[in-house]
Image (cartoon, rainbow, N blue to C red):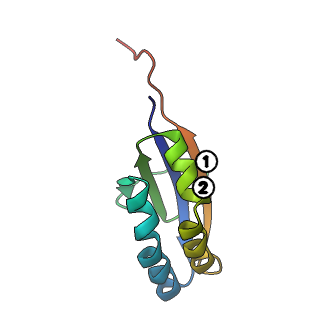
Amino acid sequence: MAKGYWIARVEVTEPEQYKAYIAANALPFKNFGARFLVRSGRFENPEGSSRPRNIVIEFPSYEAALGCYKSREYQDALKLRRGASTIDLVIIEGYDGPQPS
């Protein structure tokens, strides 16, 4: 079964309020088996647009990734993030097919 991912580009506009969002999202992330693969860090943006923070979160499945976002706990956390940041978020199924040789 392919894993699921959240891919986010974020610009934080209200750091203190965003910290409250981070604290509140810990429970739904734990409940749905989330694992941060990328959480800010150095980056280059050779093409297209960007935001200051880039995040990739892995879930055990695409269904878990969607379920986390739609959960009551995450929706409560999301209320804290709104107004504290601008975000582009994609929830996507991982790829389990052939790779280049």
In which quadrant of the rendered view does residue 14 lie? Answer: bottom right
Query: Which percent across, then down, holds residue 13?
Result: 57, 80
Residue occupying the point 55% across, 67% down = 74
Q: Is residue 82 above or below residue 34?
A: below
The amino acid type, in three-letter code, at marker 2 is Leu
State the count of labels: 2
The picture places residue 58, in percent across and down from the top left corner, at 41, 47
Which one is in front, 29 or 50? 29
Dot 2 falls on a residue whose secondary structure is strand
* Residue located 48% across and 34% down the image: 94
Residue highlighted by disc 1: 48
**Residue 11 visible to the viewer:** yes
Say few, some or many: other residues with alpha carbon within 10 Å of mark 1 (under 14 / 14 to 19 / 20 or more).
few
Q: Residues within 10 Å of mark 2 (few under 14, many from 20)?
A: few
Q: Position of residue 67 (x, y in %)?
A: 56, 52
Considering only vertical position in the picture, is 78 above or below 58?
below
- 21 or 89, nearer to the observer: 21
Instruction: From this view, report whether residue 53 is shown above or below residue 22.
Output: above
Task: Read off the residue under disc 2.
Answer: 89
The kind of residue tagged 1 is Gly
In the image, taking residue 86 as reference, residue 60 lies left or right, namely: left
Quadrant the N terminus occupies:
top left
* Marks 1/2: CA–CA distance: 16 Å
Of the 4 image quadrants, the one containing the C terminus is top left
**Left or right relative to 32: residue 48:** right
In percent of width and height, residue 24 lies at 46, 76
Q: Quadrant of residue 77?
A: bottom right
User: Between disc 1 and disc 2, whose residue precedes?
Assistant: 1
**Residue beneath the point at 46% across and 70% down:** 25
The nearer-to-camera label among 1 and 2 is 2
Q: Is residue 46 visible?
A: no
Q: Secondary structure at mark 1?
A: loop
